[in-house]
């Protein structure tokens, strides 16, 4: 049974679109989103996996929420700028059920050039951003 309402296309990799009634609102996306995913995502062929760019994300959100793409673009860019600023100051960003972004120190290590393995190469210590998925994210990925 299909509900009347607004069609929301989540990705070009989905064979069908979700239909939501305007009354259901955000509930529609969160509950029906997993119905269109493969039962075991790790069984996907690599050719089916698509890269979601900022442009595609902006288009998807603007269509699903009925907002102008420029408004969505401004919000996403402000969010990314705020994340970058926080991480550059050494802060830890935690989004419940999604995951945690944090800056970690990578130790100095010795690497080898595959063409000339006799000569060791010193890889200096550096800072890197580490992402740890949250419970819901881990569950969806596994």
Image (cartoon, rainbow, N blue to C red):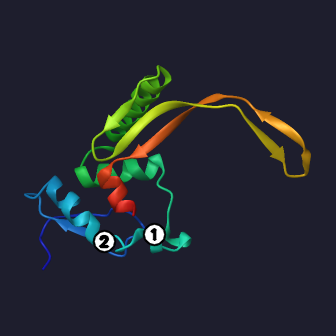
Q: Quadrant of the N terminus?
A: bottom left
Q: Secondary structure at mark 2?
A: helix
Q: Quadrant of residue 85?
A: top left
The quarter of the rendered structure image containing the C terminus is bottom left
Q: Which residue sits at x=79%, y=33%?
A: 122
Counting labels gives 2
Q: Which mark is residue 42?
A: 1
**Extreme-bottom residue of the structure:** 1
> How far from the left and from the top, in percent, is residue 103?
50, 30
Q: Secondary structure at mark 1?
A: helix
**Position of 46 compared to 19: left or right?**
right
In the image: residue 7, left or right of residue 105: left
Q: Position of residue 135 (x, y in %)?
A: 31, 51
Q: Is residue 88 left or right of residue 23?
A: right
Q: Quadrant of residue 33?
A: bottom left
Q: Is residue 79 above or below residue 35?
A: above
Which numbered disc covers residue 132?
Answer: none
How far is disc 1 from disc 2 in space, using C-alphas? 15 Å
Q: Residues within 10 Å of mark 2 (few under 14, many from 20)?
A: some
On the rendered structure, is 122 left or right of 17?
Answer: right
Whether pointer 1 and pointer 2 mark residues with C-beta atoms closer than 8 Å, the reply is no
Dividing the picture into quadrants, the one containing residue 23 is bottom left
Decide which of tag 1 and tag 2 comes sooner along the chain: 2
The x, y position of residue 99, in whole percent, is 36, 43
Q: Is 29 in front, or is 60? A: 29
In front: 20, or 68? Answer: 20
Of circles 1 and 2, the one toward us is: 1
Q: Which numbered marker is on residue 36?
A: 2
């Amino acid at each position: 049974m299909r509900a009347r309402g607004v069609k929301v296309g989540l990705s070009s990799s989905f064979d069908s679109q979700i239909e939501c009634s305007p009354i259901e609102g955000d509930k529609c996306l969160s509950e029906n989103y997993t119905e269109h995913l493969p039962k075991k995502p790790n069984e996907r062929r690599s050719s089916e996996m698509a890269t979601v760019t900022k442009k595609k994300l902006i288009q998807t959100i603007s269509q699903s929420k009925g907002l102008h793409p420029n408004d969505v673009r401004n919000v996403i860019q402000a969010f990314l700028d705020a994340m970058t600023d926080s991480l550059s100051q050494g802060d830890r960003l935690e989004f419940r059920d999604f995951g945690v972004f944090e800056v970690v120190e990578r130790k100095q290590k010795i690497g080898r050039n595959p063409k000339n393995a006799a000569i060791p190469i010193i890889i200096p210590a550096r800072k890197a951003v580490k992402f740890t998925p949250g419970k819901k994210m881990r569950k969806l990925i596994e």
